[in-house]
Amino acid sequence: MANTFINRISGSIGTTETTIYTTPGSTTTTVIGVSVSNRLQSNILVDVSLSDGSNTAYLCTGSLIPPGSNIILVGGEQKVVMQTGDTLKLRSNTAGSADIVVSALEIS
């Protein structure tokens, strides 16, 4: 089994739900960090979801991020396990407003 640490970085996410990470085939992923930041000078609201193709669960919905701030959704003691084909998505209420960094360990 190969263990590979990865980062997925996306900037200027807006009002269209955007897939940030999809677990590759024959792989289990342990998400060890998710940070979402506000790049604007006004408040934004963000939704971060996890989907297995049949079901969607939200890590946060309508979470307020003040200007120049961020929220840590996964980190420290909390981890999220993703199976093959699972997706992590981000949407903001304002165009081009959110940056996200996802750190994970892929086990294949």
Image (spheres, rainbow, N blue to C red):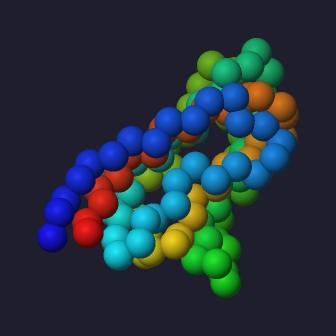
In the image, 3: left or right of 90? left
Residue in front for this viewpoint, 62 or 90: 90
Residue at image position (78%, 37%) is 14
Q: Is residue 43 above or below residue 6?
A: above
In the image, 75: left or right of 3? right
Q: Position of residue 82 (x, y in %)?
A: 43, 70
Residue extending furthest front? 25
Q: Is residue 42 above or below residue 72?
A: above
Q: Is residue 77 visible?
A: no
Q: Is residue 90 above or below residue 80?
A: above
Which image quarter is the N terminus in? Answer: bottom left
Q: Position of residue 70 (x, y in %)?
A: 57, 32
Residue in front for this viewpoint, 60 or 9: 9
Residue extending furthest bottom? 54
Residue at image position (74%, 28%) is 97
In the image, 2: left or right of 100? left
Where is residue 36, by image quadrant?
Answer: top right
Q: Is residue 29 above or below residue 14?
A: below
Residue extending furthest top? 41
Residue in front for this viewpoint, 53 or 64: 53
Residue at image position (67%, 84%) is 54
Which image quarter is the C terminus in? Answer: bottom left
Q: Position of residue 102 (x, y in %)?
A: 45, 45
Residue at image position (23%, 53%) is 4
In the image, 31: left or right of 66? left
**Circle count:** 0
Q: Position of residue 37 (x, y in %)?
A: 59, 31
Residue in front for this viewpoint, 83 or 45: 83
Q: Is residue 42 visible?
A: yes
